[in-house]
Image: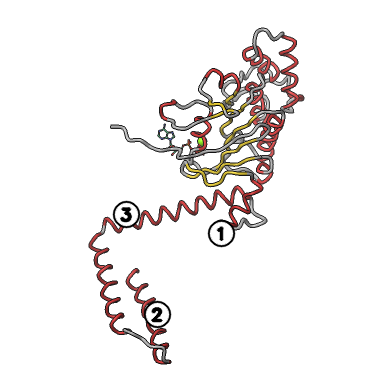
Amino acid sequence: MDSIKTILDSVSGEAREGEILAILGPSGSGKSSLIDALANRIARKSLDGLITLNGEKIDNEEKLKAISAYVMQEDLLYPMLTVQENLMFSAELRLPQSVSRSKKRERVREVIELLGLGLVASTIIGDEGKRGVSGGERRRVSIGVDIVHDPTILFWDEPTSGLDSTSAFMVVKVLQDIARRGSIVIMSIHQPSSRILGLLDHVLFLCKGTTVFDGSPASLPLFFSEFGRSIPEDQNRAEFVLDLIHELQSVWILTRRSFVNTLRTPQLFMTQLGAVVLTRFIMGTLFWRLDGSPKGVVERLAFFTVAVSTMFYICA
Ligand SMILES: Nc1ncnc2c1ncn2[C@@H]1O[C@H](COP(=O)(O)OP(=O)(O)OP(=O)(O)O)[C@@H](O)[C@H]1O
Ligand SMILES: [Mg+2]
């Protein structure tokens, strides 16, 4: 029988119009799974929960497809076509036939301007054999082909992967511009720089499929200082949270390792337990009923010294 693995557990959240919702977390925390679940790219039978849009349940797959876009990495671009041609073909495919060619051309011009691709509009995309646009520009063209029909919701898993920090910033800046024009952008990002974090309106940190933090990046310092771990002024907030998640996971792993190891060596465990019980019994009889006199106080100190040293000796 197939065993069932829980990948996302009780994750809930809200993405608002005009904002970017970024899903963060270490590798394997469930970022891609959450985006895929929201974008209806996971079989319904393996999901439990409710997705609503303006309070209405989304149960019509075709409707979600019409109002949303899931940006693919780069595979939909034709390398020998120019940026403008790639976008124009996408406009012809995605906009209804009733929209005239000149309107489509107008929309492509708008998208080129929005993505800051004016200077490379006539450059081919290129591939390994023939140089074309840069990696960052290529990534922005990928957004273009998916937003040409002006979707309300834009999903993108790791839009900045493989880009240098400036190109990554420009891609997220474009996503912010798209959001500000009235769309909802839901994306995942591995390790955002401080500059990129400043562009995000809402962040959801995942750890092993559960929510660690859900709110605005500005409220991260207050949340973690209440949690007893203040974020140093000079540290990147996202990096701090990811490091903390890693640290907590490591403590959990070490505890589990020690527990499993103890379970597999019952003789050693029983010997240690016996030694603890015996020494506590001897000490209990030696220091029985100490009073408040100076002699009693000195004996109490002696008790603590012996207790601590025997504890280290037994546990070693
Ligand atoms: N169909 C599946 N069957 C079994 N396990 C799966 C399946 N899909 C995802 N997982 C597991 O669920 C966990 C979350 O995967 P997911 O791809 O969502 O992580 P992620 O946060 O996107 O990681 P990364 O940053 O590396 O992309 C991983 O441990 C992965 O191995
Ligand atoms: Mg992923």
Q: CA distance from mark 1 to mark 2?
A: 29 Å
User: Residue at coordinates 64% horizontally, 21% vertically from top-left?
Assistant: 145
User: Residue at coordinates 72% horizontally, 9% vertically from top-left?
Assistant: 101
Q: Amino acid at mark 1?
A: Gly
Of residues 264 and 304, the one nearer the viewer is 304
Q: Which residue is mark 3?
A: 260
Left or right: 282 as drawn, with respect to 176? left
Return the x and y of residue 308 as percentages of the image width and height: 39, 76
The furthest residue to the left = 267
Q: CA distance from mark 2 to mark 3?
A: 31 Å
Residue 125: assigned label: none
Residue 304: assigned label: 2
Disc 1, ligand 1: is the CB inside 8 Å? no
| Foreground tag (2 vs 3) | 2
Query: The residue tagged with tag 1: helix, strand or loop?
Result: loop
Q: Residues within 10 Å of mark 3 (few under 14, many from 20)?
A: few
Question: Sequence order check: which comes first, mark 2 or mark 3?
Answer: 3
Query: The residue tagged with tag 2: helix, strand or loop?
Result: helix
Question: Sequence order check: which comes first, mark 1 or mark 2?
Answer: 1
Q: Which residue is mark 1?
A: 228
Question: Sequence order check: which comes first, mark 3 or mark 1?
Answer: 1
Q: Amino acid at mark 2?
A: Phe
User: Residue at coordinates 58% horizontally, 28% vertically from top-left?
Assistant: 53
